[in-house]
Amino acid sequence: MTSQEIDIAFKKAVESVNRHKEPFPADTLLKLYAYYKRATNSWHNPSNTKKKLISAFKTNALFQAQHLTQDQAKLEYIETSTHYFLYRK
């Protein structure tokens, strides 16, 4: 897959996730959050969240994704969202 093809597939996956109305499982949501932040290079410190536990989980998810390149993060996002939509119950 070329970078351009990855970008197109990533944008489609983001649109699918954003259109989805049901709540995602927490582990899936955290993965999508971290991969999206890494893929778009929009890192920020979630510690300004009023809920400290949520902030800690977000920080941990970001930490686990920090080794990924932007294209790798996009591919992980695509895979995670595809897997969710295929196997959700």
Image: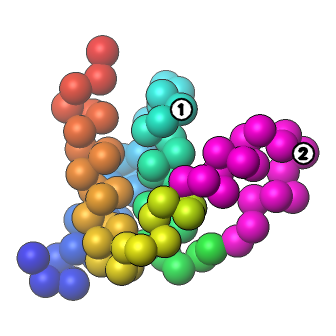
Q: How many marks?
A: 2
**Magenta region: which residues?**
44-61
How busy is the neighbourhood of tag 1: few (under 14 within 10 Å), some, or many (20 plus)? few
Q: Earlier in the sequence, mark 2 or mark 1?
A: 1
| Mark 2 crowdedness (10 Å alpha carbons): few <14, some 14-19, many ≥20 | few
Q: Residue at x 66, y 57 (%)?
A: 59
Q: Quadrant of the N terminus?
A: bottom left
Q: Position of residue 75 (x, y in %)?
A: 26, 64
Question: Looking at the image, what colour scheme do you see?
Answer: rainbow
Q: Nearer the viewer, residue 5 or 48?
A: 48
Identify the residue at image location x=48%, y=31%. 24
* Residue 10, picture quadrant: bottom left
Q: Is residue 60 left or right of residue 50?
A: left
User: Tag 1, which secondary structure?
Assistant: helix
Instruction: Name the residue beneath numbered marker 2.
Output: 50
| Magenta portion: prevailing SS class | helix
> Looking at the picture, does residue 32 appear above or below residue 6?
above
**Amino acid carrying mark 1 in the image:** Ala
Locate the C terminus and report the quarter of the image it occupies. Answer: top left
Q: Which residue is mark 1?
A: 26
Is there CB contact under 8 Å for labels 2 and 1?
no
Image quarter of residue 43: bottom right
